[in-house]
Image (cartoon, rainbow, N blue to C red):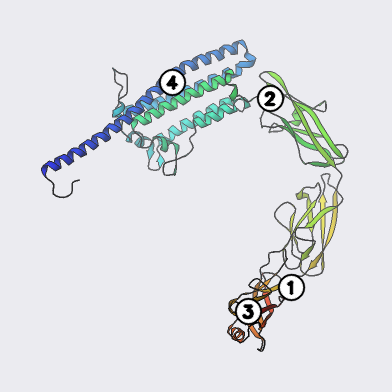
Amino acid sequence: MAGGKLSARQKMINLMYLVFIAMMAMNMSKEVLSAFGLMEAKFSDANVVTTDMNTKLLANLETKAEEKPAEFATAANKAKQISTASDDFYKYLETLKVGLLKDGKYSIDSETGKLPFEAMDKTDILDEKWFTGDRLTKKGDEVMAKIEGYKSKVKEIIGDDVKYTKAIENFEKRFSTAKVKNKDGKSVDWLDYHFKGFPAIASYTKLTAMQNDVKVTEANMFNVFLGNTLDEAVSLKNYTAIVIADKSAFFAGEKFQGKVVLGKYANVTPTGLSISGSSVDLEKAIDSTGAARLDFNVGSVGEHEIDGKFTFLEDGKPLDIPIKGNYVVVPRPNSATISADKMNVVYRGVTNPMTISFAGVPDNKVSASGAGLKKGSGMGKYNMVPTSGREVTINVTATLDDGSKVSDKAVFRIKDIPKPTGMIAGKSSAKLPRNNVEIGKIQAVLEDFDFDLPLTVTGFKIKVPGQPSVTCSGNRLNGAAKAALRKAKRGAGIQIFDIKSRSNGPIIKPATPIVIELSN
C-alpha cells in the first residue's frame, strides 16, 4: 500500500484506511470487553439471589434439626460448617477482585453503579502479581492454596457417607484445578490457563463466576442435606451383600474362610450380622475396610449355601440387607496335574515350557524339581531344558492349609531334535530353472516341529551329473558350483546333500538332500 512513488493525495487516502482499520479493531475490543462486563453483572445478580436462597435453606435445616434432631441434627451441623467455609472463601475471592480494581486504578461509576468495562483492558495486573516466568509468585501460590484449602475443608465436612458421594463428585468437577490443554495441545497449569494474559475485566468476571460456584456448592449441599435432590443421594438399599471366599473350593474338614462385603464399596459400620440364624460378634468379624470376616466349618464334600443378613443404620432406622452365597467343598488332592505345554515328550537342548500345579492348592505352596527344570514367570509355569539321558523325572510337592504335604511325580521321555529338511525356494524337490538354482538360498527347516528354533546353513555339497561334487560354504552356490551347473543339460537331476546347519542351542543333524530337475 505504501510502496512506490505515490501522490500526496494517494498517501492521504492510504493513511485514512490505516486509521479506519485501527478504529475497527478498537471497537471490536470494546465490544468484547463490554460482553465480559455484562457477564460479570449477571453473575453478581445471581450471587445475590443465591445467597438469599441459601440463607432460607440453612434456616429450614436448623428448624428441622430442632423438630427432628435424630434425622436432621447432623445434617444441620454439616450445613453450618459448609456455610462458614464457603463464606470465608467467598470473602477471599472478593479481596482479589478489590485488589484488581485498586491495582488497575479502576472505580465503579457512582451514577450507573457499573464498572468501566471498556477501559479494563490491561493484561499485566495479575500477570505481574501472580506469575513470574513459568512459575507462580507467592501470591499465585496463595491463590492456589486457598482454592485447594476450600476443597479439602468441604470434603472433610461431608466425610465418607455414601449418601453424599454424587454431591462430592460434582463439587470436584466444579472446582477442578487439573492442568488444561491450550489451543496448541500443550498442558498448562490451571491458574495460568484461566488468568494469564487476560484483560482485567475478564479476570474480574472469572473471579465473580468462582464466587457463583461457591454459592451453587452451598445450595447443592443444603438441598442434599434436606433430601430435596434424591438423585444425588445413594441409598444403601441399592447395594447387594456379596460373599467373597478366600478360595473357590475347600477340602473336606477345613474351615470356610472369606468375607461378606457390599456390592458397591461403602465404609459403613453395620449394627448386626447373622449367618444361618446365628449372630456374629461384630468386634471380631469387622476388619479395617468394613468387611465382615466369616469363620466356620465347611462340612462335607459338595455345594453349600450361605444365608444370613447384614443390618445397617440409615436415617436413624435399621436396614436389613440379605446375604446370599454359596461355596463348593472338594476332596483333598492326592495327585498332581503335570503337562507339557507342547507335547508329551521333552526335547533335548531346547526350552520346553511346562505347567505344573496341584488341584485346589495355590501356586506359592507348590514346588517342583527335576534335572534341567526351572521356575518360569506366571502361575504354575516352568521351563525344562533336558541334557543327558533318555528320561527325566519331575517331582512335585504341595503344602496344604493345615500344614500337611502331598507329593507326586511324572516321567517324561527325552528326544533329540529331529533331522531338518533341506529346501530351496521353499521345496525339498522341485523342477526349477537353472538361474533359480544359481541364485537360490539353501535352507534347513524343522518341519512339524512345535518349537521356534531357527537354523542357519553353514555348508553343503552339490552334485551335477557328469561333474565331480562341489563343496560350498554358507547357504549359496560358489563359483565352482555355478560353473558345474552351467554344464548340466536340460532335465538333469541335481542333488544338494550333506547340508549342515547350526542353531543357537543344540547340535543339529545334517538336513535331508534336495533333488532338483533343471527345467531349461
Residue 456 image position (x, y, % from top left): 64, 72
Please give the residue where the numbered disc 4 appears in the rendered image. Answer: 47
Q: Earlier in the sequence, mark 1 or mark 2?
A: 2
Quadrant containing the C terminus in the rendered view: bottom right
Mark 2 crowd level (few <14, some 14–19, many ≥20, 10 Å Cα): few
Please give the residue where the numbered disc 2 appears in the rendered image. Answer: 237
Figure check: 34 above or below 340: above
Residue 419, numbered circle: 1
Where disc 3 sits, the SS reads loop
Where disc 2 sits, the SS reads helix
Q: Earlier in the sequence, mark 3 or mark 4?
A: 4
Amino acid type shown at disc 3: Ser
Distance from the alpha carbon under mark 1 to that under mark 3: 29 Å
Q: Residue at x 20, y 39 (%)?
A: 17
Distance from the alpha carbon under mark 3 to that under mark 4: 95 Å
Quadrant containing the N terminus in the rendered view: top left
Residue 519, numbered circle: 3
Figure check: 351 above or below 425: above
* 111 lies left or right of 273: left
Distance from the alpha carbon under mark 4 to that under mark 2: 37 Å
The image shows a total of numbered marks equal to 4
Location of residue 275 (image quadrant): top right
Amino acid type shown at disc 4: Asn
Q: Are marks 1 and 3 in contact (CB under 8 Å)?
A: no
Q: Residue furthest top?
A: 67
Q: Nearer the viewer, residue 500 or 77?
A: 500
Of badges 1 and 2, nearer the viewer stands 1
Of badges 1 and 3, nearer the viewer stands 3
Q: Earlier in the sequence, mark 1 or mark 4?
A: 4
Location of residue 113 (image quadrant): top left
Residue 251 image position (x, y, % from top left): 85, 42
